[in-house]
């Protein structure tokens, strides 16, 4: 114990402060010499996981809908998941089949000149043409691939303010183009 | 030949800048194009044209008419038909089965008419009674006047599909057939 005390006595009084000052100075020099490098690995991990997750959820959704002021989809307690079918989108401004504009909608009506039978007609001529082509394409696909079957199902995505009359016109026209079963797309209340 | 001495212990760092740039562009792109709402579907069919089926369900008596449950949405309210007959409203025999009710502020109007709304709760009660009388039946025909909004149709479908009784769900008529409009 006595020897230990002796050793400390030989050290200068401001030894600790001196050492700290030296360390600080050395650190400064080192910092100037080396460029600061960010550790990117953990960030890269997060971003890669996010990217895979987003790509997966993007690829698995057969019906991709972006609600807008023209297309407000009604809420429902339905829980069935949408399938890969022909999608007829009816907004307050247009009828679109698989991203292809077909007819203009004004005040919840299709122009009488586009319908067989005029104002009272149920048959929307351009919609029938596009749906017949879509059905033909599906049937050809079914003939080439035995795993695929043409079931005559189409999904209708419709604005909640569209009158029932236009809905029946679309269903009638789709029925004429061999689409007998319908799936109404709604926003699930279950989140 | 003189071989360069490989430096030992010094690891080469990967230049991740290009990959980072790509990922940082892809993520906002996918986020914006991703659906922000969960989409579900309701299966609907149209009336089949063809000879009527002669086979009767096993529990149905041969002399009994098929239920053929139909609900029609009109401007005044909801009219229910069963076995080709209107289910009358005792208070107003000439009016709809379930007349519209005054909006209490809690119910969201489906037809843009803020004053009066359809009484879907009463519709569910009526349909539950009918379901108790015809347990095997699951088909319902929905019809509406031409000016009725699509949202009302969806609400009617929701009401006729199942009834929530606390935690319990009572299945009503999930098989929807959409018929042409009410003249």
Image (cartoon, coloured by chain):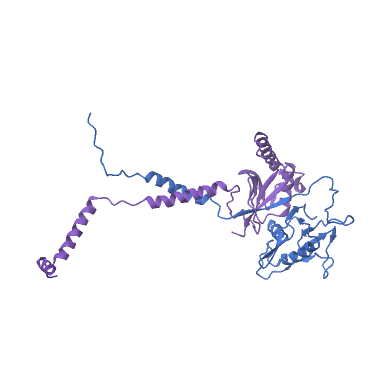
Chain colours: A purple, B blue
Which residue shows up at 78% across the image and 63% down it? B132
Which residue shows up at 77% across the image and 48% down it? A120
Residue A61 place in picture, x, y as percent: 58, 48
Q: Which of A125 and A38 is in front in this view?
A: A38
* Left or right position of A43 against B4: right
Residue A168 vertical position relative to residue B72 in the rendered view, above or below: above
Is residue B118 visible in the rendered image? The answer is no
Which residue shows up at 22% across the image and 31% down it? B2
Residue B81 vertical position relative to residue A58 in the rendered view, above or below: below
* Left or right position of A146 against B29: right
Instruction: Quadrant for the N terminus of chain A, please.
Output: bottom left
Q: Nearer the viewer, residue B165 or A123?
A: B165
Residue B164 place in picture, x, y as percent: 68, 65
Is residue A30 visible in the rendered image? The answer is yes
**Residue A116 falls in which quadrant of the image?**
top right
As drawn, the residue found furthest toward the top would be B1
Q: Which of A84 and B30 is in front in this view?
A: A84
Residue B115 place in picture, x, y as percent: 70, 67
As drawn, the residue found furthest toward the front would be A1
């Amino acid at each position: 114990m006595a020897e230990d005390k002796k050793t400390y006595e030989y050290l200068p009084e401001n030894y600790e402060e001196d050492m700290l000052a030296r360390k600080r100075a050395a650190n400064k020099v080192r910092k100037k010499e080396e460029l600061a490098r960010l550790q990117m690995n953990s960030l890269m991990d997060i971003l890669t996981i996010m990217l895979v997750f987003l790509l997966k959820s993007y690829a698995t959704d057969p019906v991709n809908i972006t609600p807008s002021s023209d297309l407000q989809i009604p809420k429902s307690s339905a829980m069935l998941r949408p399938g890969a079918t022909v999608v007829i989108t009816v907004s307050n401004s247009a009828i679109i089949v698989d991203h292809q504009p077909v007819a203009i909608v004004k005040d919840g009506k299709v122009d009488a000149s586009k319908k067989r039978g005029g104002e009272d007609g149920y048959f929307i001529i351009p919609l029938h043409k596009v749906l017949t082509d879509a059905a033909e394409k599906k049937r050809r696909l079914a003939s080439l691939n035995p795993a695929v079957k043409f079931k005559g199902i189409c999904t209708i995505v419709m604005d909640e303010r569209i009158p029932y009359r236009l809905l029946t016109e679309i269903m009638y026209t789709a029925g004429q183009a061999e689409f007998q079963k319908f799936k109404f797309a709604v926003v699930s209340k279950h989140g | 030949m003189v071989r360069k001495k490989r430096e030992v212990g010094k690891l080469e760092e990967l230049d991740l800048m290009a990959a980072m740039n790509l990922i940082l562009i892809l993520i906002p792109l996918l986020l914006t194009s991703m659906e922000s709402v969960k989409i579900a579907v309701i299966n609907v069919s149209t009336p089949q044209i063809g000879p009527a089926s002669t086979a009767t369900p096993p529990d149905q008596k041969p002399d009994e008419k098929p239920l053929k449950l139909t609900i029609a949405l009109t401007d005044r309210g909801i009219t229910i038909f069963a076995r080709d007959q209107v289910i009358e409203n005792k208070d107003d025999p000439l009016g709809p089965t379930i007349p519209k009710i005054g909006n209490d502020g809690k119910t969201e109007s489906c037809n843009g008419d803020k004053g009066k709304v359809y009484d879907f709760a009463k519709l569910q009660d009526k349909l539950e009674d009918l379901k108790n009388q015809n347990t095997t039946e699951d088909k319902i025909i929905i019809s509406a006047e031409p000016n009725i909004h699509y949202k009302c149709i969806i609400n009617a479908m929701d009401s006729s599909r199942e009834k929530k009784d606390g935690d319990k769900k009572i299945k009503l008529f999930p098989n929807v057939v959409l018929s042409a409009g009410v003249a």
